[in-house]
Each structure stands twice: as C-alpha cells, then as structure tokens.
Image (cartoon, rainbow, N blue to C red):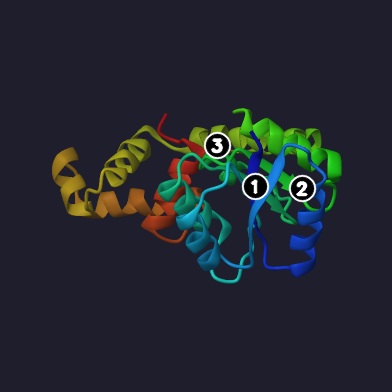
Amino acid sequence: MPIKVAIADDHHLVREGLRNVLAAGEQIQLCGAYANGHDLLEGLASGTPDVLLLDLQLPDYTGKALALEVMKRHPAVKIIILSAREESYHIEEMMQIGCAGYLLKSNTDHNLLLQAVTSVFYGELFLEETLKKQLLTGILRKKKKSEKTASLLTHKEKEIMGLIMNGLSSQDIALQLGISIRTVETHRFSLLQKLEVKNTAELVRVVVEQHLLR
C-alpha cells in the first residue's frame, strides 16, 4: 500500500522539487500540492493523505494555525513541517502541538525527506540530528531561565500569581488573602517587572511557558 503524501508550500519551485523527489519513492504517492492554506483544507476535504509536508509561511495562514486546523479536521494525517525557520522555539512549538516531524529546507536532501515520510507514516517522530541537538539546547536553556526566574519570586508573589492564573481580580485576591488592593497591585507590578512583561496576558503566557507554578 503506497504512502499518500500532500504538499503545502507557496513557492512553485519548491512544490515541483518536492514532487520530483517524492516521485522517486517507490512506496510514495503524491495526492496533492497546494499553494495556500485555503486550497489545502479544500483538498483535504475530498481526500486525506497519510503525510502532509507543510511550510510554516503560507500567505493566508500561519503554520501553527493551519497545522491545528488540519489536526482538528483530519487527526489521522501526520504533519511534517518543512521550513526555512530554524529557531528552536519554532521547532519546539510545532512538535508540542502534535506535528510528527520537522525538516529544514536548507539541508533536507532526497534521502532525508523519504526517510522522514516513511518514519512518521509508521508512527515515529522525526527530527534530524542537528535539530534534535538544537531543540534539546533550547529546552535546557529555557529550563535554566525558568529556575532562575522562579528563585526571584517571593512566596507571596507566587501565591498571588496562582490566583491571577485562576482569573481572580485584584479585589477578589485582596478579599481572599485578607490584604489591601494596593498591596495586591504592588505584588502584581513586581511580578510584571521580574518576568519582564507588560500586562496580565503576557504574565499568564510566561508563567505557562516557563512552568513557574510547578
């Protein structure tokens, strides 16, 4: 049984290059090539591939938004990101949301691409060695930063941060802890300063990303 593969990339030459590489794979069948997210979603509605090669920078969708939409509509499709973006946070983010692999356009050759497609088809995650090391380095750096940041927070700040994460207002926090609203606001301002963010939304994002309430 052939492995059905679809391509989503807005560059014609990239699509044609991938088409030629995939055609050389004896077990691979190309079932669609799309230049934007809208066309991809329409195409998947009439027939789903086993593996999708997805660029992060399509004209009408971000890579993350499109990947999540594909997973929602077609959970059986295995997504491999094929991108020029090599920053570790892009790799970590896409793998965390459920993508099966990540390849760089700059160093993906014929053999690596076919290996990645075959691997994810059989249920494995695929990152080539350079990206594995890069991802691990990024995770360790983030962990150290998280530990350093957490050590700067006082017990009261962590307590208030937990209540903020639960959606409580400054007034609610003051009532629950038996302190003044002014004291709560002082702690809230201190949290914003220590975490180097500008508002509560960014505060919540950093707390979640850095696992500061573990």
Place of residue 151 in the rendered image (x, y in percent of width and height, measured from the top left)? 51, 32
**In this picture, residue 153 sits left or right of residue 124:** left
Q: Judge depth for marks 3 and 2 and give the one in front.
A: 2
Q: Kindly identify which numbered label has been placed on residue 146.
A: 3
Q: Quadrant of the N terminus?
A: top right
Determine if residue 61 is in view. Answer: no
- Residue type highlighted by circle 1: Val
Please name whichever residue, 48 or 194, is drawn nearer the observer in this view of the structure. 48
The residue positioned 80% from the left and 66% from the top of the image is 13
Label 3: state its secondary structure. helix
Q: Is residue 198 among the parts visible in the rendering?
A: yes
**Residue 133: image location, x then y, percent:** 76, 33
Q: Are marks 2 and 1 in contact (CB under 8 Å)?
A: yes
Q: List the residue tagged with mark 2.
A: 22
Measuring from the top left, give residue 128's x and y in whole percent: 77, 36
The mark nearer the N terminus, 1 or 3, is: 1
Residue 113: image quadrant is top right
Say which element carries label 1.
strand
Quarter of the image with the C terminus is: top left
Q: CA distance from mark 2 to mark 1?
A: 8 Å
Which residue is depicted at the point 19% across and 49% down? 180
Type of the residue with mark 2: Leu
Q: Is residue 23 shown left or right of residue 199?
A: right
Q: How many marks?
A: 3
Instruction: State the CA–CA distance, disc 1 to disc 3.
Output: 39 Å
Residue at 31% x, 44% y is 165
- Circle 2 crowding by C-alpha within 10 Å: few under 14, some 14–19, many from 20: many
- Disc 2 is placed on an element classified as helix
Q: Is residue 97 above or below residue 170?
A: above
Front position among marks 1 and 3:
1
Q: Which residue is mark 1?
A: 5
The three-letter code of the residue at mark 3 reads Ser
